[in-house]
Amino acid sequence: MLYHLFTYLDREFDFFGAGVFRYISFRASMAVLVSLLIAMLFGGKLIKILQRKQVGESIRDLGLDGQMAKKGTPTMGGLIILMAILVPTLLFARLDNIYIQLMLVSTVWLGLIGFLDDYIKVFKKNKEGLAGRFKILGQIGLGLIVGFTLYFSDDVTVRQYIFSDGTTSAVNASSKFVDVKSMITTIPFRKNNELDYCNLFSFAGAAFQDWSCYLYIPFVILVITAVSNGANLTDGIDGLAAGTSAIIGTTLAIFAWVSGNTFFADYLNIMFIPNSGELAIFCLAFVGACVGFLWYNSYPAQVFMGDTGSLAIGGIIAVLALIIRKELLIPILCGIFLVESLSVMLQVSYFKYTKKKYGEGRRIFKMSPLHHHYQKQGYHESKIVSRFWTVGIMLAVLSLVTLKLR
């Protein structure tokens, strides 16, 4: 909004200082600052409103230390995160950018699904919340929107460089190039690291090759559903999901910046994605929202994000990774989410298997998700969170190393 206003003032009236809004670095810096301020200032007021309306978390006794002391802590704090993301993005990002539009839709879409789930739990006194099938349908719906947009929109392109022999490549810059529709993505740790979804079944003949591209949309749905649910499972102790997401968001901001900058894309020999640099503004607003939320959510938490926040932040991370063609890096970058999800799947599967085989269910972990296992072992929440953050930082650095380590 402000970008368009100040661009107009600069062009028409040569307004003093208005030209600074042309720079992504300035707008991204302002976005993270405003996001932090909104989260901290709006957060305190929202917590008081939630307390007055008695929007407290109902705690199921799992035998964890300090668990019952959290009973009545306000939930639906994800509204703080959503507000702190949306306002700076609307203020500082280019609203005519297809990627920004997609991120705004994704944030509101999953935020509403999570809000509905929390509303049913709190105000309808239904501990189950929104039925799982409706959550999945909502995630599938967003997956269809994102998948069809990325696949069919003419505004979604990558730069292909044309060499003297007529061949093209998404890297190794030459003086001639063309921005084209392409379903290529990046394979981590490979030197020739381009994978074209449309060529997955080329070995089976032209007929299968024509249809192979459509596998991309189900894959998008899978990624969004998996990461969104992974973030939801990780949101189990104070500060864990928000801090982990801030680390991931910072990494994605760097990827978006270099992928949308011709100089850095050329220097790093990576795919250049036109107009994707604008996502750095959204990413830093996201990081500011998560860090600002920690002001109230770090141990001992004054507010929980609820599904309003956890579903949204997971979906945001997934869509960002898909847009900047780093979705195959998600198992590393979102390793915390992955391990938390796997711990639940392994626990449930093994329990059912042993119950069927031995007549008695057995467990791999003392409790799942994994952070509860460590709580059962006697570790304090703060220690678990800080160690998970440390691992998250290591995974983020490893992800960034893929820019050069091939």
Image (cartoon, helix red, strand yellow):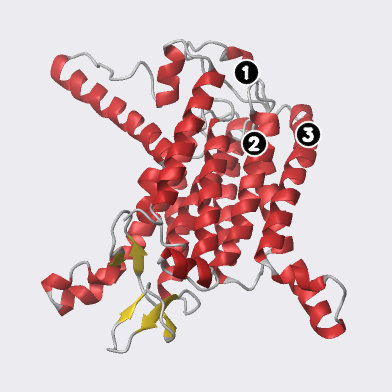
Mark 2 or mark 3: name the one nearer the start of the chain. 3
Q: Could you tell whether 280 is left or right of 165 in the image?
A: right
Residue 233 in view, yes or no: no
Task: Name the residue tied to disc 3.
Answer: 44
| Quarter of the figure that contains the N terminus | bottom right
Circle number at residue 76 = 2
Residue 201 drawn at (x, y percent):
18, 68
Picture layout, residue 322 above or below residue 331: below
Displayed quadrant of residue 26: bottom right
Q: Secondary structure at mark 2?
A: loop
Q: CA–CA distance between discs 2 and 3?
A: 13 Å
* Dot 1 amino acid type: Lys
Q: Quadrant of the C terminus?
A: bottom left
Identify which residue is drawn at 67% across, 61% down: 25
Q: Distance of mark 1 from mark 2, alpha carbons?
A: 14 Å
Q: Nearer the viewer, mark 2 or mark 3?
A: 3
Would you say the residues marked 2 and 3 are in contact, meaning their CB atoms lie under 8 Å apart?
Answer: no
Disc 3 element: helix
Amino acid type for the residue under numbered disc 3: Gly
Q: Which residue is denoted by mark 1 in the rendering?
A: 70
Q: Quadrant of residue 304?
A: top right
Residue 335 percent location from the top left of the image: 39, 39
- Residue 173 visible to an observer of this rendering: yes
151 sits to left or right of 46: left
Q: Residue at the spot x=37%, y=75% of the render?
A: 182
* Residue at the image position 48 percent from the left and 56 percent from the top: 319
Task: Tell me where residue 404 appears, x and y as whole percent.
Answer: 39, 56
Callout 2 amino acid: Met
> Which sits earlier in the primary sequence, circle 3 or circle 1?
3
Q: Is residue 173 placed above or below 231 in the rendered structure?
A: below
CA distance separating discs 3 and 1: 18 Å
